Structure formats: C-alpha cells, structure tokens
Amino acid sequence: MSAIDNNREFDVVIVGGGPAGAATGIALQNIGVGKVFVAEAGTYSKPKIGESIPPDTRKLFQRLNIADAFELQGHEPCLGSFSCWGSEQLGFNDNLFNPLGAGWHLDRRRFDKFMADQFTQGGGLLAGETRFASVSVAHNATYPFQLSFDNQPPVRCRFVVDATGQPAIVARKFGAQIKMQDAMLSIAAYFDCKDTDLNALKLTLLEAINLGWWYCASIPNNQLVVSLTTDATIAKEYALKDPKNWFALLNQTAHLAGRVNTLAPPAHLHYWKTPSSLLNPPAGNGWLAVGDAASCYDPISSQGVYKALATGLKAAQAIADWLDNKPNTLGEYRQYIGNEFINYLTQREYFYQQEQRWQDALFWQQRQAS
C-alpha cells in the first residue's frame, strides 16, 4: 500500500526531501502546522560531495530544535581553513576562538537522511522514490492544489513548496523563471584515507589555479573529498571528466598535491553543475521555493546547507501566515530571497577580484568581468 493512500489531503506539500525541504517541514511542525507531506525523488543513498558548514549553523539547528540530535551524528569538526588565493602563500583562518566552537565537515548523504528522519520523527509523512509529475489548481477549493507523481496517487494541499534544487521544477510550473548569473561545473572524487593521519586534514584547503579552483576536506569514515570547480568548456577542452587527467592536474597543485600524493588515483569521478542563479519570483500565491530552488550560490561561498536551513525557517513562518490568511509575509519572503542574493553577488565579486595572478585565463576573465 502507498505511504499516502490513507491520507491524501495536507496543509502543505513539499516537493524535495533534501535539507531545505526537510528544514521547512521541521520548522512548520515546530510552529504547529501538522499536516505536511514531503515527496522525495530519491532514497538518500546517492553519493554527495561533502560540505563544510560554519559554526553559525549551530544557531539554525537550535532554532529547528535539532541541535542535540545533530551533535550525536558525529560529523567531522572543521577547525578552520587554509587558502591559496591571490598569492602563492597559504592564508589561514581558524575557528578556535569562535564562541560557537568549530564548524563541521558534513557527510552529506548521512546528513540529508538525518534531516529527513527528524521530520518523520516529528510526525511528518515522507515518501521516497516519489517523483513529481504535475500540479493543477482548482480555484475556491478547500485544498486548491493537486500534485501528481509518477508512482503515487495524487495529493491535494493548501500550499506547495518547491525544494527540488537547481531545476526548480515545481516553481516553473507556476510561471517562475530561473535568472542565471553564472554557470560552472564541479568535478570531485572521494579518497580512502584509512592509513593517513586525518588529524592533519581537519582544515579545509582551497587552492586557486589558472583553470579554476580546488577544494579539499576530510569527511567521516576516513574519507577525503577533493573537487575542482571550473567552466564546462574548460573541462571539455582538458578532458577533466577523465579520472587520469583530473588526477594529473591535481598533482600539479602547489599545496593540495601534498595531501593526495600517497593516495591511489580515483576510479571514477562525480560531477554536477554549480550555477549562480535566482528564481524570479521565488514565491507566489500558494507556493514558494526554498534552498537551491529559490537561489543557487557559487560553492566558493560554502553556504549551500546554511542557506537551505535558513530559507526553510523563513519559509515556514511565511507559509503559516498564509494558511492563517495573513499573506503579507509571503512578500517579505520574496524580498528576503532577493536581498540575500544581492549580498551574495557582492561578496562573490569581491572574492574573485582578489585573485589577479591569471588575468588572461578564461576562467578568471569570466569571473572578474564587470
């Protein structure tokens, strides 16, 4: 029997069960919106790149009432970071004196499953392997939105949340458009470091090169994740989706190569688009988008998970007000998403302008163009 055969009417349906969707569901539960359904297309088993999250994320976990449960997950501490950016010398930024303590290197697959479990433990209903197909609107109905899925019966609801990530497939059904500011590609590998001193790898390492920039961090289970962010055209020109070429380029780095020179080359790579984009609009009558569906940030910002949680918290209050016939908060949410994106673009521009060693290189010309 389907997970939703016996309950097909909800206050809120969230399409997408990643951190943004789960955070929205948890926040809705915390403010008393109980009939929430999350439709997740996957099964939380697909590998995902690790992500470093800042100490300030602890405040968001506290607001979601899941801080203690998160601590028990045992993600690797992030004590700070090294960066080779704008100079051949390594710069250092540590979290040792941050009053909130260290940040974390997340095992994203396990973290996403943790967030989903927190939602279901709070009484929410989540169906995995449930891929969104379409949405229709019946005006003046108690539950005006009907959502259809590939392998589940339709459900009806009063409000719809798009948490589908970059494609924003639900919001685009409502006429929203994705405004692209930049588009890049990240190519990553996982290394088994069981025979390596991981204490030396507790700090993330960021290293700029003429073709883009590298990121390296330890994650749980004695693993090291290393990724290269560049343009798709550059990746094609240098055949960087070939593990041998990718690993050869990695071993040419000034600082990162020392972390991997004793490790075996990867057998395969993972790659995905990493755009900077804004959904226009990010909310409308009876719907809104959260996380990467609302806006995508350059991975250089390390704000993906933080933004997912923050937008989920903000969205939950706007949704609760909408359900209580107070629609003004939805406009405030739209303004919030737009303002945060403008702030992000300003910070991103400043950061890329700091690197002036390869002014003739295509990657840096495109990032530094006025």
Image (cartoon, helix red, strand yellow):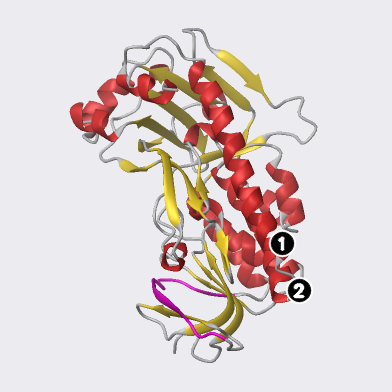
The answer to whether 242 appears left or right of 165 in the picture is: left
Q: Residue at x 36, y 16 (%)?
A: 253
Q: Residue at x 43, y 33 (%)?
A: 193
Q: Which of the numbered marks, if any, corresponds to residue 329?
A: 1
Q: Which residue is mark 2?
A: 32
Nearer to us in this view, 119 or 182? 182
Nearest to the eye among marks 1 and 2: give it: 1
Nearer to us in this view, 360 or 114? 360
Seen in the picture, residue 12 relative to 312 is either above or below; the reply is below
**Amino acid type, label 1:** Thr
Disc 1 element? helix
* Quadrant in the picture for the N terminus: bottom left
* Quadrant in the picture for the C terminus: top left
Query: The magenta stretch spans which residues?
Result: 125-139
**Amino acid type, label 2:** Gly
Distance (Cα) linking label 1 and label 2: 17 Å
The answer to whether 52 appears left or right of 276 in the picture is: right
Q: Position of residue 132 (x, y in %)?
A: 40, 72
Q: Position of residue 180 (x, y in %)?
A: 41, 43
Q: First in sequence: mark 1 or mark 2? A: 2
